[in-house]
Amino acid sequence: MASTPHETSGRATARPDPAPGQGLHRNLRVWEVTALSVGFMGPVMAMSLNGIGVAGLVGKAVPFTFIVSFAGTMAVAYAFIRLTRYFAHAGSVYALAGATLGPRAGFFGGFALLGTYLFFSACIVGACAVFFDAMIGELGISVPTWGWLVVGVLASLAALGLNLRESKTVTRVLLAIGMVGILTMLGLAFVIIARVGSGTAPVSTGLDLGTLLPGDASWTAIMTAAVFGFLSWAGFESGTTLGEETRDPKRTIPVALTLAVVLAGVIYTVVMFAQSVGFGTDQAGLDAFAGASSTLTQLSSTYIGSWFAVVISIIAFCVAFASLLSCSAAAARLVYAMARDGFGPAALARTNTTGAPSTATYLVIGLAIALMLFLAVIGGGPVEVYYWFATIATLCMVVAYGMASVGVIRHTFRPGSPIRAWEALVPALGLAFLVYVYVVQVAGQEAPYTYFPWIAGAWCLLGLVVIIAAPRLAERIGSRISQEDLG
């Protein structure tokens, strides 16, 4: 990365890099970047909740539906995996779309991704409160009705404290929490599979391998349910925001993203198979699966004991916190990258002595707390904070992911592109999947969910208005991207 201002004829001058020793530190490796992406996805949190709605739509074909979601996610992830071989930047979509489609498109995509990260940060603050409530419920402790607000604020402040430290510290915390969560969840899955296979389980339908096929579920139902499965991978691209903090980023980032998506795909399929056969694949079992409040906790009590349900609930809370830590870290780096190009106060482009974008981190955590408190004032609780902001974030996410997919298609057909023309089919399929995700998220919803597309649309439109009204910002973005070692 250059350390001096860059100016070309007819272009505005980009802001200078921070002083030596005050910028982002390049010291991360593959597994540390993977930890950020996996931490954002929150596998234990996803597997506790995301299969429930799927089971209500496709019956016993839940594992098959997650395989379909896995394929759709890989098609979407292709754009990030391919482009990060050539472009390394803290701005993720902001830079990837900017380098392939132009600075205005880059700002629009980056602004949509910023909405994703900000709304997801608020959403996960609510998730921390939800899982904390479940945890203390398992322990037989009661708290006041307003206690969830205290939990949300404390979790946010803890995330702030960690994110002000060196990124290596953050990723190692994420790795530790993620590994414990994944191993515990897989341990439960293998116990369920072993007991069902040996005939010692409280269900009699056995290891029904028909769950790995569509069965009686219609393809319409499977594709609709696959949208909910896809949300289990939300945030897989967050590792791209570490592009300026990674050793050999053009090798490390693509490998880390691939590992994150594939690892999650394998884990999700195994765990969903275990949950399906654990509840049983007869009608009673399907009803129990679709009606569960937290599948991992319920199956823990059934197959191991109430003590393990307590362990799972504690781990689920820790994983929710890890997801907040990952999301806010990614958001802060995106704010930092945009501020460095002139969007927002110059203070947002500052880093502290550990190399963390400190001012941007304060802003992100402050906004997450403010959004949580706003919803509490209008009568919402932690569940509403979780689901409402998650829906808005998802709609913004689809727009951002779509910009990356369009960007890689454009880059494929540029003269001299190293990407072969036939590969454009993959992001084209990913783009079609994203359009379907957006339609499913919008169609047939009831209030207040009918309002959320308008909120997400207004956020994205604001980004478009900013870049049209401030042409010099686009010039600075273009100058900065041409200055970076992106080619």
Image: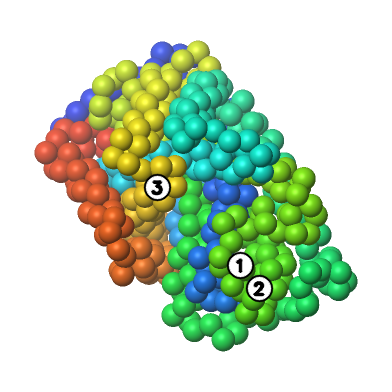
Residue 435 on image: x %, y %: 34, 66
User: To which residue does mark 1 refer?
Assistant: 289
N-term mark: 1 or 3? 1
Quarter of the image with the C terminus in it? top left
Q: Looking at this view, is 7 or 38 the one in front? A: 38
Residue 427 on image: x %, y %: 42, 64
User: To which residue does mark 3 refer?
Assistant: 384
Question: Under tag 2, what secondary structure?
Answer: helix
Q: Looking at this view, is 485 or 98 the one in front? A: 98
Apparent side of residue 408 relative to residue 233 in the rendered image (left or right):
left
Q: Which mark is residue 285?
A: 2
Q: Residue furthest left?
A: 469
Labelled pair 1, 2 in contact (Cβ < 8 Å)? yes
Q: Looking at this view, is 247 or 287 the one in front? A: 287
Labelled pair 1, 3 in contact (Cβ < 8 Å)? no
Q: Label 1 to label 3, Cα distance in Å?
A: 22 Å
